[in-house]
Every structure is written in C-alpha cells, then in structure tokens.
Image (cartoon, coloured by chain):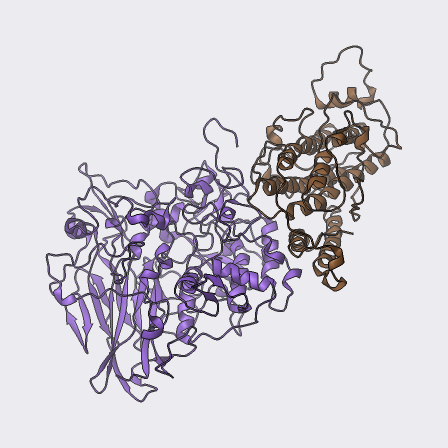
C-alpha cells in the first residue's frame, strides 16, 4: 500500500507516475465508496462532454474543415474515455450509471475553474455550458474543460466532501490516488469493454484484467491515456505521448484535445443557422424529440454495456444519435438531451 | 420491314467470366443482393445451363476435376412494338417481348437468327492505366504512355497491331446450330450478312504464338478467346477464354517478369470484349437487323451476390441521366439540376444502396460497429420515417458534390478506396440525389416497372464493380463516357445503354494488314463507335495481377503516394470488397450456424505477408496467374443444399487454397495499418 511510505525528506526524484501521485498529494485515506463516487464523477464528466462536443461538431457546415476533423477526433476519444473510466469503475466493483447530463449556465460537472491557478476563465471568456453551435462560448468552454495543469500541480484537496476540481488533471490525480490506496479492492476482468483497441495499436491494454499491483498498473495506464489525450502532459504545446496516440483515424494524433480546440478557436467555422424558438411551432420539433428519445435509449444501452449485460442495439443507437444531432442543426434546431 | 416493331438484344452489355473448366454456367439475370419474390435467396446467382432461371448451387462451381467453371453470357432477342411512330422512345419503356424462332406477336414467322460476335484483346498495345489520373490522362489531347513501348510506333502502328493485338476475327453462329464455334486460330472467321454466314478466309487472325516463337504460358497455350454456342431456344451464349496468360521469353530464355499490378510489358491475357449482333431471318426471306449488344469476357465473380455500393449500373445510369437525357423528369441537362420534385422509387433506387452496405461484411473484415450500423441501414424500409433511422440527415454519407469530402475518411461512407486520384469512394451524384429525396420524404415505394429486356440490362450491369476504376474488374471509366453509346436512342429506338458498334467492313479484310486499329479512346471526340477490344484494353494486363493486389490499400495508392486522407497515412482500406473478397467466412467452418473467425480469401502457401498492406494476396505475382482459379466463391447460404444454414449468411465455398493448422496471417481487426516507412513509427 502506498500510504505506508515515509513522507519525503527533501527533494524527491520522481521516477514513476505513482511516485508523482504520491508525493504531490496530501496523504489522506480514501474509502471504497469515496473512490466509487469519484469514478461515477469521472463517467459524469466524460459523458457530459460527448453531447456538448458532438453538438458543436455537427453544427459545422464544412465536414472537410480542420475544425470539423479536429472536434470529431476529440469526440471519438471522449467515447474512449467513457469506456476507460467505466472499465476502471467496474474493476473496483461499480458499474456506472448514465444519467441525463445537464447543460445549464456555466456548470460543468466536477470542474470549478476558479480553483485553478492561474484562473483560465479570464483567458477563455465568455463561455457557456449550454448546448449550442460551435461559437465563441462553446469553444471557450471546451478549452476550459481540457485546460492543462499549467503549473506544477498542487496537491488537490482530498477530503471526502470534495466534488469539484480545478482541472481534469487534478481530478484524475485524485482518482489515481484513491485507486492506489484501494488496490486490495481491485478485481480486473469484470465487465470490461474494449471497442477501441484497434484504434490504439501502440497501447498495451485498454482494459483492466488483472488484480493487485499488475491491475493497478493497468488502471494507471488508462488514467494516463485519458489525461494525456485530453489535456496533454502538464505543459501544453508538447506532443502527447506516442503510445496514447490514435493510430487510425485522427488527423493530428499528436495533438491533445486542448491543442486541437485552441486551433479551432483561432478561426471559428461556419455553422448552420438556428431558427429562433419564437418562429417554431411545437409540432415542428420532430428532430429534437427523436434525438431525445434515442439519446435516452442510448443511455440505457450504455448502462447495460458497462454492467455486463447485452446492450441490444447499442451500436445502432450510438450511430443514430450522431445522425439525430446533425438532423437537428440542418433543420434549424438546437439539439436537446434532457 | 415492319415499321411498328424493332428488335433489341438484351442485356445491352453482358459479362462472360473466365474459368479453367470446359464446363460453364450462365450469367445471372437477377441483381446482386436484392430480394426476390417468393424466396429467401437474393439476386445475383448465376444460372444452371439448359434452364431458364434455375440458380446454381455450391456444387456447380467446379467440375469433377476441381477446375473453375466459366460463366457464359446469355443474350436474348426482344421485340418492341412502336405504339406511336411519331413519338420518341422513353425510359423505362416497360415493354418488349422475347422472341425465339417461330411465330412472332406481329404475325411474322422468325425462321432463323444469325448471331455474330467479334472478340479481341488489345490490352498489350493499349495505353497504361494511370492510378492517379484515370480518364484524365486522356484529357487535353494527351494520352498516357503506351504499354510495351519497345515495340515501335503509335497505337495504330501496323507493327504494334500485328505484334501486340489478339484478334481471332468475328464468328457467326445460327440459332439452329448444334455446334459451338471457337475464337481460336483453327476456326475460320465468319460473320452474318443478310441471311447467310460468310466465311472470312483472308482475315488476319493474330495470336501471340503466331508472333513469338517462344512463349511462357504457365496455364496452357493462349490460343482462344472463347467460343459461341446457342441454347435450345436459339439464344446466344458467349463463353470466355480459360484465363490463360502468355509472357515473352527474353534473350536469356527467361520469361519477362511481372513487374507491377497494372501494365506488365511482355505479357498477354485472354480477357476480351466485342460487339454482339443478330440478324433475324423471316420465313419470307426478308431479314432485319436487331440493335446490337456488347460482351465483356473478364474476371470471375468471386462473390456474385455481394452487391457493390456503386456498381457499373450506377455509373452508367448516372452518366445517362446527367449527360444523355435519359429521364428529363429526373434531371434537366440544360440547367444541370435534378428535379426537386422527382420521387425516386425506394425499392429500386434507394434500397439497393442500403442492401449493398449490409452485404460488405461477408467479404471484408468490418468491425462490429460497422456490421451493426449496416444492419440498421439494411433494416430501413419504405414505411420508415427517414429522420428516425440511422441514416437521418445523411450524416454518414460522403457527398459527391463536395469535392473535398473524398479526403474525409471515418465516419463517412462508403469507406473504400476511391476512384483515380481520390482517397475515398462516393456514391454517384444520382444515387446521392435519390438519398437526399428520400431523406426529404420525397419518394415512392416503387417506380415504373422495367420491361423484361430492361430488367436484364439492369441486372447485368448492377452485378459489376463501379465507382473505383483503377482500373476496375469488369470495365473501367469508359462506361461513363457518352461517346461510347448510341445517343440517338429515342429516335432510333435502340433503347439506352447500348454501345455503338463501329461499322466494320469485313469484306475488306486481308491477310497481311491488321483489320482492327488502336480504336477508341476517351476525351478525343471519337464518336464513330467502338471496335472489338476497345473496352477491355483499359483493364490491367494480365488481369490477375490487378485482382491479386487490389485487396487493401493506403489511400495514397491513388494519389501518387501522397496522403490526402484525414486519417493516419498508413491506414488500410478496402479496394473492391464486394467484387474482390478480402476476408470471408468459410462455409465448412460454420458449425451450428455459429460463424467462425474470418479467413483471407487468398490464403495458404505463398501468401504470408510481413506487411499488412499486402495481406490477402499472393506475394509472388507469378502465383496469381497460375492459382487465381483456386480462390473460393462466396454464395448465399441458400446455395448450400442440405447444410441448414440460416439464409442471412453469405459463405465461401470450394476454395482450393489450403490452410493447414493455425493461419500465420490471421485476418486483422480493422482498423489496421501498413508498416510505416523505414525509421518511422506507426
């Protein structure tokens, strides 16, 4: 168990990620329920990004544009991240739930940018956490979500009342900390899902199949994949680690989500016009109603998929929801997921 | 001549397919993968010889010695009544009645039919296939480099024609004949003239063996391009060659090597093509010429029921709609706009695209996501609200009207390698318009019925590979060129999709002068019709090297090695998955209707690939010209009598490429990559 180590006495040479996690965290004791809660938080956050990013994606008119291609590659990786987070959760005995994400105001699940230093909101304002087209408010929100840990990371507050973190890096460092402490509760091979390994030929595993120290290494690998792909390593503008790069469909596999969003932000693409609500009648909301119905079915299928049950027509729903979002925009509607 | 009736041969273009056996079956007369009435068997299956329409089964693919049977192309004659002489023809006509010797509907008695076919192979004297340019290589008055440039002269040079062209001359056969006639050097060329068959004793027959004293002919002598016979109703059957090849022996007594996939100097094959004509001889001594057809002798159909998302039919139809006024209510050629009020028929214009997508899984290593998504596409019927389907908004269809989308890979479909110079394939503009109309709820369940002859045209062309003509399998980009067709089809009443025969005066044939010339080329305003050999010359020589190599590719194979696709440059995509199976389910490995792991269609000894880019191919190109006939054939499970398979499966039968033990080159899960360049990472 990692908490049995003595506290550092003077400068420490960090030779492994576990060392890094250990020495940059406050020493605290996590319980299994607390870890499971955080793993559900991870699912909530990763899953929240998918409709948000996808809606911005499919609002872009030109599918050949870099903006479209970059955001699409991020969406694909967010789907991977949901899988990875769910695999970790199942390894710790928890099958995640997929509640309907809420898109209101500036609220992004479990992230509070004001806690970060420097506060990135000044740079990425205005931003909105409401579903919308790829515009200034959306791209700023996307940059904030994927914002790197710019400074040397401070230990996050690990008390069991904490539900929000300054950035994704800190959030996952907290999870890694708890996961490390609870190695004895780790049982790989339970409800593991692998839909993406052919897209990541250089990653040794996208699942947790082992237990003990070997299983923890797998958990740690999946966490690294999420954070490396999302925000990049702790300093921005460096290529993400080779092993975590997509080997198939990514137009710029070396770029983190943050870096891709920064490029999109420099020149926002043309998006489909949205018809003002005042000009729409209730009966013309067909595309939105279809999307809501299919999205609800997709959430149910995801719960089955990540709890060892047959998800039925999961693949059809996954593909169809994307088409439904596109259909909303082309018909002049803003997609809705409530 | 009865001015109220015209006669047409159908299919307008038909396909004989090479095999190594003396035996044969007949070309399919139904359309690949489409539902048929009163059966679970889908269209595209060839027909047992001697029957009207009985499908072959897996036991009919090879003869008793295991040789691959050939596919004969069956042609029929149809009579069309002209209801109003002053009113030009339309498409679809919807009419037409098959005629055979005997009383006709108009009261005349058909006493005899004299069929004439002229096959030739001009490949070795023709121009190179240029993968990055396609038909554009002929633009601006230019032409690509000639094959076999060491033989002096241009495409029409006597020395080249006499050395490089295979021309056995025409052959005529009467409907009453009981003997086949071969396109070889032993039989005398002949043609129909009036009510007679004229022998051409001075025709300049040319085969490689007459030019080269020594040839390397690994599968036997290349001494015939096929043969003609008639069935018991006087219909014509054209049989192709035996898939033989010949190579020149160099000064060191070594066959010239196969150095590439498309344009091998010093090599010949026995694929061919040419005009099919028929003279009707009536009991009163009068004769009438039918509107002619064309036959193409080409690669076997290794998966005859697996529909191409873009077939030759789709390309031909698209060209005719947009450039030849086929259906003015669909497309206005003056404004170059589709009619926004046109309502395509779901069953014949939209559903085939959906069916094709679902069938790809049986010949390609699609991931589960794709299989399930395609199943959802296939499940759409004419009653569904498009916006409630997986095809809502055409979100995943590559738009052929936006040129840049040919560089966009996943998730846009079709996800196979594109046409010359393009990374990815698109549906045709007409197909896309139909999809758009469907998406806008502007469609009908079914459209006007095709006549029986028109149905044969559709079936024949829809069973072939379209879209990606680099150079293709049966035919190449010339099918999109208006120049090759009879364009006054309304007034002449020839009907559409009919290749214009160049007028050949056989009476002028002399022993020492080539009869045929270099012939038609695209984009050079040549509108006097095509000669024998003018379509197959655009295909690879020998065809086997192209078939072998076109399994899976990086998209940069089409773009001079430069990656233009949005994905990883080393990513591999399917080339011609429906027509050139890559990964298959072997029928013998299916137990209790549980599908086994897929195997490469080309597998076993000599196929081990240390680079996934060459997986599923014979590594030594010489092996593909000698063992192509060992490849198995994918058939619907209903063609496996007594096996109890569920009808949804399409399984490989009768492969003679043996794998013992565990394959060293298993089928990889897609996506997968070619090896990166030396010193580079994946």
Q: Residue furthest bottom?
A: B107
Quadrant of the image occupied by residue B77: bottom left
In this picture, residue A5 sits left or right of residue B450: right
Q: Nearer the viewer, residue B393 or B173?
A: B393
**Taking B43 as reference, is B605 above or below it?**
above
Q: Is residue B621 placed above or below A291 in the rendered structure? A: above
The reply to whether residue B320 is visible in this rendering is yes
Residue reaching furthest to the top: A10
Image position, residue A293 (x, y; %): 74, 57
The x, y position of residue A272, in whole percent, is 64, 50
Chain A: its colour in the image is brown
> What is the drawing colour of chain B?
purple
Residue B648 in view of the camera: no
Q: Would you say B665 lies left or right of B108 here? A: right
- Residue at left 59%, top 39%? A199
- In the image, B667 versus A74, the foreground residue is A74
Q: Is residue B172 left or right of residue B69?
A: left
Instruction: Give residue B532's quadrant in the image.
Output: bottom left
């Amino acid at each position: 168990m990692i908490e049995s180590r003595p506290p550092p006495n003077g400068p420490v040479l960090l030779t492994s990620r576990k060392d890094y996690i250990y020495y940059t965290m406050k020493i605290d004791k996590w319980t299994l329920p607390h870890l499971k809660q955080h793993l559900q938080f991870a699912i909530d956050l990763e899953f929240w990004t998918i409709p948000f990013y996808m809606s911005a994606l499919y609002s872009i008119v030109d599918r050949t544009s870099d903006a479209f291609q970059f955001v699409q590659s991020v969406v694909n990786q967010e789907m991977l991240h949901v899988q990875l987070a769910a695999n970790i959760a199942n390894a710790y005995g928890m099958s995640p739930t997929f509640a309907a994400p809420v898109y209101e105001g500036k609220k992004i699940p479990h992230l509070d940018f004001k806690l970060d230093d420097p506060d990135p909101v000044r740079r990425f304002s205005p931003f909105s956490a409401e579903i919308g087209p790829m515009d200034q408010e959306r791209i700023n929100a996307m940059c904030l979500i994927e914002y790197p840990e710019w400074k040397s990371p401070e230990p996050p507050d690990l008390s069991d009342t904490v539900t929000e973190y300054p950035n994704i890096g800190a959030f996952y460092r907290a999870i890694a900390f708890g996961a490390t402490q609870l190695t004895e509760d780790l049982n790989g091979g339970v409800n593991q899902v692998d839909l993406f390994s052919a897209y990541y030929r250089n990653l040794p595993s996208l699942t947790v199949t082992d237990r003990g120290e070997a299983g923890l290494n797998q958990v740690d690998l999946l966490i690294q994949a999420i954070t490396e792909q999302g925000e990049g390593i702790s300093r921005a503008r460096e290529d993400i680690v080779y092993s975590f790069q997509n080997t198939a469909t990514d137009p710029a596999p070396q770029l983190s989500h943050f870096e891709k969003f920064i490029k999109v932000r420099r020149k926002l693409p043309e998006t489909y016009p949205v018809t003002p609500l005042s000009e729409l009648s209730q009966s013309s909301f067909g595309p939105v109603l279809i999307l809501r119905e299919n999205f609800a079915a997709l959430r149910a299928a995801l719960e089955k998929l990540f709890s060892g049950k047959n998800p039925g027509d999961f693949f059809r729903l996954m593909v169809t929801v994307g088409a439904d979002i596109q259909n909303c925009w082309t018909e002049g509607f803003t997609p809705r997921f409530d | 001549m009865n001015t109220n009736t015209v006669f047409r041969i159908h299919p307008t273009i038909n396909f004989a397919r090479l095999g190594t056996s003396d035996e044969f079956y007949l070309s399919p007369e139904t359309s690949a993968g489409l539902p048929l009435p009163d059966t679970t068997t889908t269209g595209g299956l060839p027909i047992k010889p001697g029957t009207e329409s009985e499908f072959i089964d897996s036991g009919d693919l090879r003869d008793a010695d295991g040789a691959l049977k050939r596919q004969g192309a069956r042609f029929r004659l149809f009579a069309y009544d002209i209801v109003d002489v002053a009113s030009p023809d339309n498409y679809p006509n919807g009419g037409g009645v098959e005629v055979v010797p005997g009383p006709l509907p108009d009261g005349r008695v058909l006493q005899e039919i004299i069929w004439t076919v002229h096959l030739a192979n001009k490949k070795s004297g023709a121009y190179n296939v240029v993968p990055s340019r396609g038909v554009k290589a002929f633009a601006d008055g230019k032409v690509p480099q000639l094959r076999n440039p060491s033989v002096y002269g241009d495409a029409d040079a006597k020395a080249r024609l006499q050395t490089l062209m295979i021309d056995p001359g025409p052959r005529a056969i009467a409907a009453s004949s009981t003997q086949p006639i071969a396109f070889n050097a032993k039989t005398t060329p002949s043609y129909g003239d009036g009510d007679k068959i004229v022998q051409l004793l001075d025709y300049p027959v040319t085969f490689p063996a007459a030019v080269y004293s020594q040839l390397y002919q690994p599968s036997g002598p290349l001494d015939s391009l096929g043969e003609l016979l008639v069935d018991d109703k006087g219909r014509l059957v054209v049989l192709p060659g035996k898939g033989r090849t010949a190579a020149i022996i160099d000064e060191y007594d070594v066959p010239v090597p196969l150095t590439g996939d498309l344009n091998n100097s010093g090599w010949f094959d026995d694929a061919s093509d040419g005009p099919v004509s028929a003279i009707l001889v009536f009991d009163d001594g009068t004769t009438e010429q039918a509107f002619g057809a064309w036959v193409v002798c080409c690669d076997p159909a290794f998966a005859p029921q697996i529909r191409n998302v873009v077939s030759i039919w789709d390309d031909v139809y698209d060209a005719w709609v947009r450039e030849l006024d086929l259906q003015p209510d669909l497309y206005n050629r003056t404004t170059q706009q589709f009619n926004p009020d046109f309502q395509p028929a779901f069953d014949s214009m939209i559903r085939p695209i959906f069916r094709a997508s679902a069938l790809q899984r049986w010949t390609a290593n699609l991931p589960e996501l794709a299989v399930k998504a395609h199943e959802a596409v296939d499940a759409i019927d004419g009653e569904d609200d498009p916006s409630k389907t997986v095809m809502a908004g055409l979100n995943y269809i590559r738009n052929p009207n936006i040129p840049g989308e040919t560089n966009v890979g996943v998730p846009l479909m079709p996800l196979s390698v594109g046409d010359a110079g393009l990374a990815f394939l698109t549906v045709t503009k007409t197909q896309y318009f139909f999809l758009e109309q469907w998406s806008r709820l502007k469609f009908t369940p079914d459209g006007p019925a095709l006549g029986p002859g028109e149905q044969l045209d559709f079936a024949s062309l829809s069973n072939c590979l379209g879209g990606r003509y680099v150079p293709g399998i049966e035919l190449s980009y010339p099918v999109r060129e208006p120049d090759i067709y009879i364009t006054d089809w309304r007034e002449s009443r020839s009907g559409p999709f009919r290749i214009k025969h160049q007028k050949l005066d056989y009476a002028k044939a002399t022993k020492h002068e080539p009869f045929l010339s270099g012939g038609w080329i695209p984009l050079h305003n040549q509108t006097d019709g095509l000669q024998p050999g003018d379509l197959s010359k655009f295909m690879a020589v020998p065809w086997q090297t192209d078939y072998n190599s076109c399994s899976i590719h990086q998209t940069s194979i089409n773009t001079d090695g430069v990656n233009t696709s949005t994905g990883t440059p080393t990513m591999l995509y399917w080339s011609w998955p429906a027509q050139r199976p890559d990964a298959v389910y072997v029928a013998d490995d299916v137990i209790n209707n549980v599908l086994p792991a897929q195997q490469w269609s080309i597998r076993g000894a000599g196929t081990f690939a240390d680079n996934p880019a060459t997986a599923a191919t014979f590594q030594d190109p010489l092996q593909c010209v000698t063992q192509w006939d060992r490849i198995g054939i994918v058939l619907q499970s209903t063609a496996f009598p007594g096996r109890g398979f569920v009808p949804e499966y399409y399984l490989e039968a009768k492969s003679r490429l043996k794998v013992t033990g565990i394959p060293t080159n298993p089928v990889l899960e897609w996506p997968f990559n070619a090896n990166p360049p030396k010193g580079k990472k994946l």
